[in-house]
Image: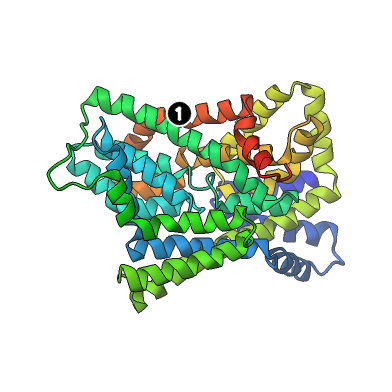
Amino acid sequence: MVAMLLICLLALLLLSVPVAIAMAATCALVFSVFYAGTPMIQLLAQAMVTTSDSFPLMAIPFFMLVGTLMSRGGLAEEIINVGEAFTGRMAGGLGATTIVACMIFAAISGSGPAVVAALGVILIPAMVQRGYDAGYSGSLVAAGATIGPVIPPSIPMIIYSVIAGTSVVSMFAAGVFPGLLMGGCLLLVNYVICKKRGYKGRPRGEGAKSPLQECWAAKWALFLPVLILGGIYGGVFTPTEAAVVGSVYALLVGVFVYRQITLRKLFDACVEAGLLSCLSMFILGGATTFGRLLTMQQIPQKLAEAMVQFTGDPILMMALIMGFLLITGMFIDTTSNVVLFTPLFLPIMKSLGYSPVLFGVVMTMDLCLGMITPPVGVNLYVAQGISKTPFDRMITEAIPLMLALALAIAITIVFPQIALWFPDLLGLPY
């Protein structure tokens, strides 16, 4: 049964069948062969409904809505202005602005492609106009957007928490400094590349606002991550409630402060957020049924025993699992990887003494790297559509940025307190 389960899933994925449909179809086929007397359609439907009927998962559509409202309500432009005020004059200043803006936007929207779509349409043409290579501009936005699911709020972390039974708040707290580390590594590589290529910053002209003035001008946009994260860490509301509060705040600011959200833009934002959320829920439902079949055959336990026998060194085991997830991240989206492999690898990590929260953070970072690796580098595809650059050119430009992100992952594995000290400071379980 296990062989049939895995072969069917692999065959459907190789045929480019969407992951959610591939998992549901595989489960239906296995049910029909090995559990002929079981009402398989009812079981599949029940699994999908009960999986989606979760209070923590309700945060996903609302965080999606926050991002879509920001991109249409003028808040994204204000964030970019703040970033340029701090980094615009250094070598590669606009590139550094891109990374800083991605980090700020990551603290509002938990989706990498949403960050690319919201900021790329503004920043990529601006960088090209300043003399940046179009391929590098697109790759930089795509790489910066990988920070989106690491710095909280994070949709993959919400899904991981539901599957692993960990605290969403603990996961969010543990993701803050690894996300900042990813941004710091990208800033360093961007500075070296821009210095070598002669990409200069923009000199401060007369009447230019100081960083503090830009921050004050963008106060409405900058207050949103403070509202969301401050409310969560302060115990004022749960992550799901924070997502709702953030959506209402972004809507009110876009309508009454920046006056850019019309009824048409609101409708488009809701439709986009709904479509993105439905995709995540559909994948989660199919993967849950798939995971139940694996659990029935004790596949996670058998895999854990085999890997522990191969090596008992915790760091080597973590490196092997991260290498495996990096490869799967090249072919399968982040959400699908989380729901597929968390039940498989989490028991192994626990047996070696790793914190479930630490593993969740490192797993998210590793899978986010897959967002800019071919053939399914979703961030690169979104950025390519904006930059109009050949895909092979963008991959070449993205290689040093991939190495920078890989370095951040390695540092977090070797020094786990980078992730764990903040939850510890807040008294959160990890």
**Which residue is denoted by mark 1 in the rendering?**
404
Q: Secondary structure at mark 1?
A: helix
Horizontal side of residue 53 vs 379, given as left or right:
right
Q: Residue furthest left?
A: 206
Horizontal side of residue 47 vs 332, given as left or right:
right
Binning the other alpha carbons within 10 Å of mark 1 as few (below 14), some (14 to 19) or many (20 upward) gives: many
Q: Residue furthest bottom?
A: 263
Give percent across and percent down for residue 346: 74, 40
Residue 368 in view of the camera:
yes
Give percent across and percent down for residue 216: 32, 54
Residue 281 in view of the camera:
no
Which residue does the image show at 37% across and 27% down from the upper left?
A: 189
Where is 98 relative to 399, above or below? below
Question: 287 or 223: which is nearer to us?
Answer: 223
Q: Quadrant of the C terminus?
A: top right
Question: 203 or 94: which is nearer to us?
Answer: 203
Which residue does the image show at 35% across and 52% down from the upper left?
A: 79
Question: 128 or 2: which is nearer to us?
Answer: 128
Three-letter amino acid code of the residue under disc 1? Ala
Which residue does the image show at 36% across and 38% down from the upper left?
A: 140
Give percent across and percent down for residue 282: 62, 62
Question: 399 or 36: which is nearer to us?
Answer: 399
Which residue does the image show at 68% across and 39% down from the upper left?
A: 424
Where is 297 relative to 394, above or below? below
Scheme of image coloration: rainbow
Give percent across and percent down for residue 168: 66, 52
